[in-house]
Amino acid sequence: MVILTGKHLTLPQFDRVVNGKEKVKWEQDAMERVMKSREAVDRIVANGDTVYGINTGFGKFSDIRIEKNDVVALQRNLILSHACGVGEPFSEDVSRGMLLLRVNTMLKGFSGVRPEVVEQIIAFLNHGIHPVVPSQGSLGASGDLAPLAHLALGLLGEGDVWVNGQKVSATKALSDAGLKPLVLGAKEGLALINGTQAMTSVGALTYLEAEKLFACADLISAMTLEGLRGIVDAFDEQIHLARGHGEQTKVAARIREIVKDSKLVTRQGELRVQDAYSLRCIPQVHGASYEALGFVKKQLETEMNGATDNPLIFNDGAKVLSGGNFHGQVIALAMDVMGIAVAEMANISERRIERLVNPQLNDLPAFLSPRPGLESGAMIMQYVAASLVSENKTLAHPASVDSIPSSANQEDHVSMGTTGARHARMIVGNMRRVIAIEMICSMQAVEHRGVKLMADRTRRYYKEGRKVVPSIKEDRVFSRDIERMAAWLGE
């Protein structure tokens, strides 16, 4: 059980709830903050004070006052009108992450929602009900309006939801769980859709996947070092301390530790003086991507615990302030950085694949084929890796440098953070397949060299990998091997 406070949600906890399906509960102090915030909204409505989002229109309509009798209709209309996302739906885990992040920000006590809204979202999480949310249509400022409107639809008993991977009507899912549709009060529609929870959910899931794959990439690259009889001196601690980058030094230390008892790696001058950059610079390239991932983690965990809606209610209602915390620029930049960092991990992996299969660059059988010429072996696997890294180069173009005005130019600068997050997740999927190809080729190379000569750590990894993809004894449909290996990596 994860206790939500609005302040302390971490990426490991996010992982436990979203991927591990762990249940959640609110902290009592946090719920008391929610109730005090709601009392302030009720006073505003009762007194007839004009406050944006409570009794005014939205966006360009912010100067239009809404009568007290229409305040509830205003919130429902907001959800219905904004639920216009398009395209394939986000995966179920993204929707679950959005619910978790949305309720966590409400528990900060700045949103002005009733406890019933918090309770409905918590019930959805604990019953495994996840609204179907189209993946396209967010500008990432006024937050993720369209995606979050679709999320809110499910809470109202509208639209479709996922339950155990099956798409059903929200009406049926609520009935089966013994829940009632939520009826929105003043400000609650706006509090549900102003925020960055779509881009942050996609970003958090992408980060968690990338973190696992980076560890795999280190281990696979060490096996490739053995398969190519690489020079271990390039990983000497003194080289990396001399430069001073922490993650670079850590990668070098990991590689040294992995291959410490290998009889396949060489020393400088033994076979050659220097290796190509894709081997010699593993610490420098992997380390730089790890550094970027650390930056992304910090931004995500801050945003996961941030108040991202508008207006925000402070001092028990003494202050109700309109601002721009829904603007997704901080996540947009982080997602672009992550996409670039992951793309580079795939880029250097593809170059190592080339060195494993190209007979002009090694002394292994051409294309690792059991019978070169008659059988093509891994030739076209390198093509696939090249295609994936080339696709990544287009996906890694920063989304955050784009902006387009909306709402009659009231919202004249937007983040495109959700686009950046979606692209980063696609890049991670491509990287997964690229390093899977490297793993297949690397296993074939060390098998040719002699498995008994491998380091203990890589030999164990090789044996586990061979349970997933058998040795290449003859040509076969390698697509299946790549997909099986990709699915296994990072499990």
Image: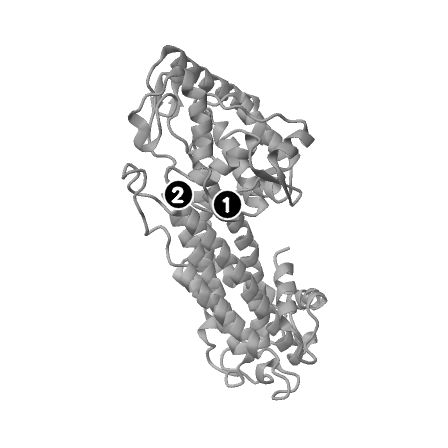
Q: Which residue is rendered at x = 32% and y = 51% of the image?
A: 402
Using the image as rendered, state which of residue 405 and residue 109 is in the foreground: 405
Crowd rating for badge 2 (residues with CA inside 10 Å; few <14, some 14–19, many 20+): many
Q: Position of residue 145 (x, y in %)?
A: 42, 38
Q: Which residue is mark 2?
A: 140
Using the image as rendered, state which of residue 214 and residue 274 is in the foreground: 214
Position of 108 relative to 368 (above/below):
above
Residue 254 in view of the camera: no
The amino acid type of the residue labelled 2 equals Gly
Q: Position of residue 106 (x, y in %)?
A: 48, 28
Q: Nearer the viewer, mark 1 or mark 2?
A: 1
SS of the residue at dot 1? strand
Residue 134's label in the rendered image is: 1
Crowd rating for badge 1 (residues with CA inside 10 Å; few <14, some 14–19, many 20+): many
Report whether 315 appears left or right of 33: left
Q: Position of residue 58 (x, y in %)?
A: 35, 30
Name the image quarter holding the C terminus: bottom right
Which residue is the extreme one toward the right?
A: 467
Q: Earlier in the sequence, mark 1 or mark 2?
A: 1
Q: Which residue is rendered at x = 59% and y = 39% of the image?
A: 161
SS of the residue at dot 2? loop
Using the image as rendered, state which of residue 75 and residue 478 is in the foreground: 75
Q: Please identify the quarter of the rendering in which residue 480 is found.
A: bottom right
Position of 264 relative to 337 (above/below):
below
Name the image quarter holding the N terminus: top right
